[in-house]
Image (tube, rainbow, N blue to C red):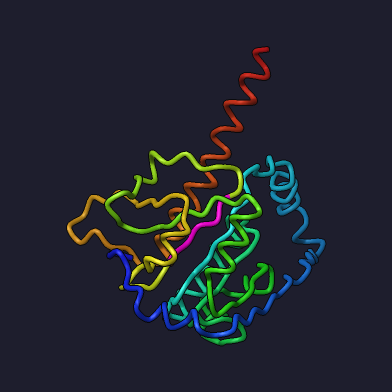
Amino acid sequence: MRGVGVGGAFVLMQHFIVLSTFHEPQPLSLTLSPGERGHKEDFFVSMLSMPKPIRQLRLLCHNVRSLWNVGSFFRTCDALGVEHLYLTGYTGHPPRKEISKTAIGAEEFVRWEHAANPLPVLQKLKDEGWQIVALEITENAIPMTAFKPEEHVCLVVGHELAGISPEILSLCDATVFIPMLGKKESLNVAVAAGIALHALRSLVFARDDKNNIAAEEN
């Protein structure tokens, strides 16, 4: 995840016709045996009563080499309620056993699509009002802890070593980075995406709590 990104390979992608495949998630069905219902019913009731997050999140992953990282993206998106996953460039996509191994089935429940060129995808999102946020280390990057996201955010991550290309960064509305305390100052791209998405999601619940307190006081 460290580095400003190398755009040379990316420029070549712009000469190809954009081919996009879209996949709807499978419906989730839960079947509990009589013995399981007793200690699981309270859990599911509490989950259903949780406040629904206001912020809508999407994730775009460009030129990520590792299929295991892709599987981790699916698992994280499912856990954090990311509504759409874009896999662009040469990022792998299902069906692949390596993806399924780390996704442990999450690829069946997360909406995803593959496109060769991410630029039209990002431009369409911008036209629809989405805030495009790059997770990258640049001179103008904002610490994740100080970032104030909008209501519709698409997080962008790039190549494990080269990072996000300048062409993609030019379309982003903001660039953020994760403050680190160690000497290496480097995170696996899937781990970094998970931390950033969790921070974006946590900001929603924190704001909801403040709004609820204010409403009760009034």
Kindly report the secondary structure that dominates the magenta region of the rendered protein.
Answer: strand
* Left or right: where 129 falls relative to 102: right
216 over 189 or under it: above or below = above
21 over 129 or under it: above or below = below
Q: Residue at x 23, y 50 (%)?
A: 181
Q: Quadrant of the N terminus?
A: bottom left
Q: Position of residue 153 (x, y in %)?
A: 56, 51
197 over 212 or under it: above or below = below
Q: Position of residue 23 (x, y in %)?
A: 70, 75
Residue lying at the far left of the rendered structure: 183
Question: Residue 10 falls in which quadrant of the image?
Answer: bottom left
Q: Residue at x 66, y 67 (%)?
A: 110
Please name whichever residue, 67 or 44, is drawn nearer the observer in this view of the structure.
67
> How many marks can you see?
0
Q: Position of residue 15 (x, y in %)?
A: 50, 83
Q: Residue at x 62, y 86 (%)?
A: 95
Please name whichever residue, 58 or 26, is drawn nearer the observer in this view of the structure.
58
* Left or right: where 68 falls relative to 163: right
Q: Position of residue 69 (x, y in %)?
A: 45, 74
Which residues are the magenta region? 153-157
Q: Is residue 41 magenta?
A: no
Q: Residue at x 40, y 57 (%)?
A: 135
Q: Quadrant of the C terminus?
A: top right
Residue lying at the far top of the rendered structure: 218
Please name whichever residue, 131 or 22, is drawn nearer the observer in this view of the structure.
131
